[in-house]
Each structure stands twice: as C-alpha cells, then as structure tokens.
Amino acid sequence: MSTRTEGAGSSGLASALVASGALRSDWLPAFWAVPRDLFVPDRVWPGIADGTRQNPVVDRRKDPDAWLRAVYRDIPLTTQWDDGSHTGDGLGGTPSSSSSQPHMVFSMLADLDVRDGQRVLEIGTGTGWTSALLAHRLGAGNVVSVEYDPGVAKAAQENQRRSGLSPLVVVGDGQLGHARGAPYDRVIATCSVGRVPRAWVEQTSPGGLVVTPWGTLYGGEAVAKLTVGDGFTAHGRFTRSSAFMRLRQQRRVLPPHTAFLGGQEWPADGALTTTALSPVDLSGWVEQFATGLQMPGAFWSVERYDDGSYTLWTYSTDALSWASIDYEPGADRFEVVQSGPRRLWDETEAAYLWWDAQGRPGFERFGLTVDGDGERAWLDSPDHPVPAVGR
C-alpha cells in the first residue's frame, strides 16, 4: 500500500472524528502515532456505523485498496466469528472479536478521562488497538489488558510490537480483572456486560472510573461511566448508545421456543386479547433498553413472514410464561396471546407507558448504582429508581 493513500485515509478519519467531537486534542497524538491499519488483520467483515450488520469479507491480499478504505472508515470491523471456528469467506454465525468503530473507541477513551501516570485495566484486548492507544498516552507499564481467547491475545501482542508499544496482555477471564496489577485508576471494557463484575470495582481505587458497555437481557445497550466509592460501590450515568459483543462469561443461554408451549400448537392455553400498541413502537434501541430495565428475566424473538407481517414473541427465562403479538402493516389493533404466571405483554405495555410518561428519555438520563446489594438502574437520580413491572 502507498503511504500517500494511507495518509489520505487516516487524515479523513481524523477530520471526521474531530468534527464529531469523539477525537479530542489530548488523544490526537496517539491517533497519529498508533495507526489503526497496524491492528487490522488481512481479512475483515466491515460493519455499519449504527447497527450490527456485517458486509462481505474484504481481503487485503486480494484487494488492498478496498481493505485500506475499510480500515479508515468510521465503522467496526469483524475480525473473528464463532470463537474462531469459522474460517470461510462468508458470514459466520456470531461475531466474536472485532476492531471497534473508531468513533466509539475515542468516545469511550474520552469518558475514561485519564491523567498522566494513571494505571488502566482494559477488559477485552481484541486487536490490541485500544490498549496500544492507552500505552502511548500513559506508558506501556501503566496499561494491563485481559483477553480470554489465546489466539486473539497473541495476534494483538504481535500488532502492538509492530507499533512499538507493548502493554501487558494477560490471557484470562475478564470477569476476574487482574488482581496482581491492582489497584487501577481506570477500568475500561471493550465488551458488554449485563452485570458489572465485582472484581472490576474492587480493583479500582476510590474515586476511579469504570467505563463499560452495559445492556439488559431484553435488549438495548449503553456505555456506563461509573465512579467507584469506598467499599464495593460504584454509580454513574450512561453516556451514549453502544452495541458491543457480550463478555463471553456472560453470554445469554436461553430456553428455546419449543420449551414454552408444552408441545401444543399455538395458541395452546394462551388467553387472547388485542392492543393498540404496535410492536414497531418497541423496536428502537432505547425503547428496548427502557423495557428491559423494567422486565428482568424476559427476552424476545421475531418470526417474520413474506408479506411484511411478523410475530413478536416474548418469553421468561424460567420457561413458564410467554406472549405473542401479531403485527400486520397498516393495522391499528394487534392480536395478543399470553400464557403463564407472568402476563408478559401486559408488562411490556406497562414498561412502554412508563417510559413514554417520563418524556421518552434517552440513554443519558439513565444511571446505574452498583453495591453489595446488586445493581439498580435509575432515571435522572439514584432517588428515582426504574420500576420493575409485573412483580
């Protein structure tokens, strides 16, 4: 590849990131010194900036110009599928490692608010780019990164050596942090969690920060910026929407659809009603987030049909309750069937109506408190906890 092409690509990305406010002046030297292309493998599946869809593979050996364009676009790049078991050019089943979207990388680094001399623990090394950026800013001796996948960790270390930076990369369970290097002033996760691991808080000095994507079981996810207090406590607000791969030890293991109807054909023993609330109104990322905060132990799936209609199924993790709602384009009322001790569609409506009554808040109005009693989400203030409906 030519230096001129690379420079044009990186300059354009830098300009876009600066204009958006993601890349600030204190991180510009690291951006130029730690180029993204050193951390991207030959074969990647480019994503899109505002979603989770992947495009066909781009292979540097076959089309170096297309590869370089992908590297210096503000998009995520999937680098591994199915924990490494997928090796073909097509899309795999589930993305399991990536080079995160640059806008998100630098936005989260801004949230991290590092100071010279501080020590940082990163959870999820990935390609090694984020920890290399941190190493350039703080010194390699102040950065520890934990990666569960040995192959991913090895590739990241090779990438970092090429960049002239070698922070400590540890192969291990990210939920456990890295106690030997504690305490840390900052912890940053490049994977999402549904509960903040205790070790992350315990290994952070009081007054330090934990920055992590956090999502509900139902759906929706945002970056939490938590200030650590004395003892096992942390609290703070969500700063922005996010869509990261789940920490492997917290991946969802859910009962299948066949576990719910007891071997009967739909509608089985379900009770039939109708509703004016369209399932389309629940499909947004923040709507899913607000619903999930209020409906612990609930998840959903969609069954789509050729004419544009679909069925939204909602289930409980104990496999005792389910609900279905049939969406038809242009309809103003929709058929609902629900069964089990939890009336899941009733809960869904109540959750949506609560969110609507609060002025349809975005992620930034929500916050999270973590302590010895667990986790509690709140709206605007810790004194205004998000209610759990139907319980």
Image (tube, grey):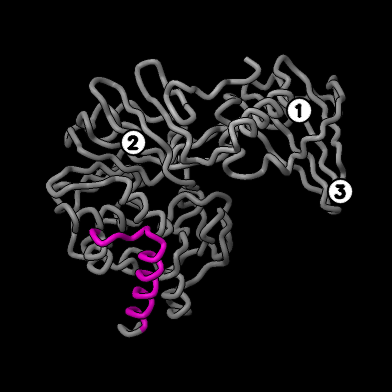
Give the secondary structure at mark 2. loop
Instruction: Please state the horizontal and vertical placement of residue 265, each as a whole percent of the image.
Output: 86, 28
Q: Where does the N terminus fall, quadrant-wise?
A: bottom left
Which range is magenta? Answer: 5-26
Asked if residue 154 can be seen in this view, the reply is yes
Residue identified by numbered label 2: 173
Main SS category, magenta section = helix
Disc nearer the start of the sequence (2/1): 2
Residue identified by numbered label 3: 330
Kind of residue indicated by mark 2? Asp
Of tags 3 and 2, the one toward the viewer is 3
Label 2 neighbour load within 10 Å: few <14, some 14-19, many 20+: some
Give the secondary structure at mark 3. loop
Give the secondary structure at mark 1. strand
Left or right for 341, reference 355: right
Q: CA distance from mark 1 to mark 3?
A: 22 Å
As rendered, which of 261 and 84 lies closer to the eye? 261
Instruction: Please state the horizontal and vertical placement of residue 26, each as a whole percent of the image.
Output: 23, 59
Instruction: Please state the horizontal and vertical placement of residue 216, each as a whole percent of the image.
Output: 53, 33
As rendered, which of 107 and 173 lies closer to the eye? 107
Q: Is-magenta flag for residue 159?
A: no
Of tags 1 and 3, the one toward the viewer is 3
Numbered circle sitting on residue 323: 1
Instruction: Please state the horizontal and vertical placement of residue 110, each as a whole percent of the image.
Output: 31, 51
Q: Is-magenta flag for residue 20?
A: yes
